[in-house]
Amino acid sequence: MTPQELKNSILQMAIQGKLVEQRPEEGTAEELYKQIQAEKQALIKAGKIKKEKPLPEITEDEIPFEIPESWKWVRVSDCISNRAGLAYDKGNLDIHSNDMIRVLRGGNISDMGYSTKPDDVMISAEFVKPELFLRRNMIITPAVTSLDHVGKMGRIEADYDDMVVGGFVLMLSPHIDEDIFSQYLLCAFSSKYFRDCCRSIVNKSGQAFYNLSRGKMMELVVPLPPLAEQKRIVAKIEELLPLIERYEKAWTRLEDFNKRFPGDMQKSILQVAIQGKLVEQRPEEGTGEELYRQIQAEKQALIKAGKIKKEKPLPEITEAEIPFEIPESWKWVQIGEICSVVTGRLDANAQDPNGAYAFFTCGVEVYKTKDYAFDCDAVLLGGNNASGDYKMHRYAGKFNAYQRVYVITDPPKETLDYLFYVIKWWLPSLKHNSQGTTTRFIKLGQVTGMLVPIPPLAEQKRIVAQLEELLPLCERLK
């Protein structure tokens, strides 16, 4: 159960009379209802609220669930009056005085609360009528907002002569000025039942906003317990809310852990693999030094045959550059020492839906082109990405690549398979060290100079086999 589901369940129990027991000596809601109606008539007589057209009696069809016999179903208009907040011209905000009033908007209202913000609108007191100031026991709710925020309620705990709400916020004023009554109404109005009712009576305004109908809201029905029982309900909810908050923090930590766990496990497995700790070393399989010399000999043969270009020698690897220890049979090398690294040759306009060959972009989205520029076994690394989350792909055959894609090729297939996972391990570091502002990019030198711990070829093969078995399990955990 999520924290919100738990909170919804508690509030639902509260408004169904299941959170605390009923006590006959506390009277009935009918008695409280008559008291509220008497107060309402007194407010009308004093001109503080307007007399409204009587609403029809509540029918059986309107009652959503059973409540205790001592309770009573009432309409919202039986309990509160409502009015919109301060409407103002934007030009008024340019006028400053010694008496400035804060204007709360929908964004200030949270679930069962509200808060001020550094960017709140401030308006001179000359534009504010005294009856619009927020008063203790008022409940405020957005009247125009996104659907997710419809029905969010906040209760005012004090009288404010320096704070109002804007015109797109409703002020709900209980007919009786009792803290317990407004606290209970806040709980009832914050229940999922009531919020769903509010969402059912909105009208869409534009692309993203919804208008809460004031008239229809006043017709909604709410369960009313005796005042003494309301006090015990509120006390129980106030006792439980801090526990829900603690549960929410623990839940959030667990959710965060669950989200990170597959990725963290994948990184750990990759690290163990390239540190020589995933499979055992076998002396009969030779050494990384022997493999390195073999690759160098093959590379020189390719240069001599004109198949690849001779490149400027890379600087020696220093002790300070080595990130971790590796087995004695392994060797630290740079990608440029054992691979040919070139960039793609086409831009995005080269894609053709009728083409015959794969075309890789930096996001490693495969399009098609009519012709091919590469016919090889390669690791492809997208070197250009807005977020710096660089993508990789393993491909063999005829293909084309975007001009910012690095094509890494020419060592034995087993080494390319192994290199794919080494580079994957380096990706967070590449992201950290990438350059650019709007679009992050990797330089060619960062790729050719990337350090690779090279095991013997047979060990590489066993490492890759283990990774191909373990990493999909991590993916399944996501």
Image (cartoon, grey):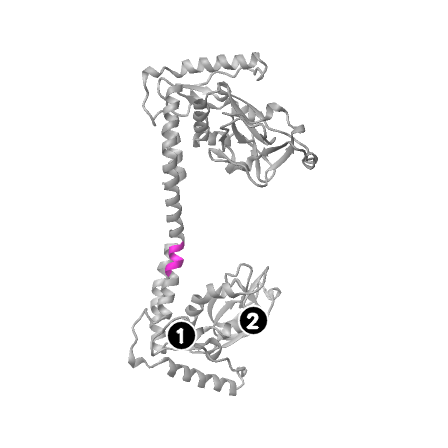
What residue is rendered at 45% in x and 31% in y? 190
User: CB of mark 2 within 8 Å of CB of mark 1?
Assistant: no
Where does the image place residue 375, in percent across and percent down from the top left?
51, 75
Q: Is residue 313 above or below residue 119?
A: below
Please, which residue is most extreme toward the front here? 98
Whether residue 273 is visible here, answered yes or no, is yes
> Mark 2 vs mark 1: which is more N-terminal?
2
Magenta stretch encompasses residue 261: yes
- Residue 290 horizontal side relative to residue 335, left or right: left
**Dot 1 alpha-carbon crowd within 10 angstroms: few under 14, some 14 to 19, many 20 or more:** many
Instruction: Identify the amino acid type marked 2.
Output: Gly
Q: Which residues are magenta?
A: 260-265
> Residue 308 or 3: which is nearer the viewer?
3
Q: Is residue 164 above or below residue 300?
A: above
Residue that mark 1 sits on: 453
- Residue carrying label 2: 344
Residue 367 left/right relative to 237: right
On screen, residue 68 versus residue 156, left or right, reads left
The disc labelled 1 sits on which kind of residue?
Pro
Residue 19, placed above or below residue 34 = below
**Dot 2 surroundings within 10 Å: few (below 14), some, or many (20 or more)?**
many
Question: Looking at the figure, which quarter contains the N terminus?
Answer: top left
- Please identify the dominant SS of the magenta region: helix
In the picture, the quarter occupied by the C terminus is bottom left
Q: Quadrant of residue 61?
A: top left
Give the percent coordinates (x, y) of residue 358: 52, 67
The image quadrant of residue 471 is bottom left
The x, y position of residue 93, in whole percent, is 67, 36
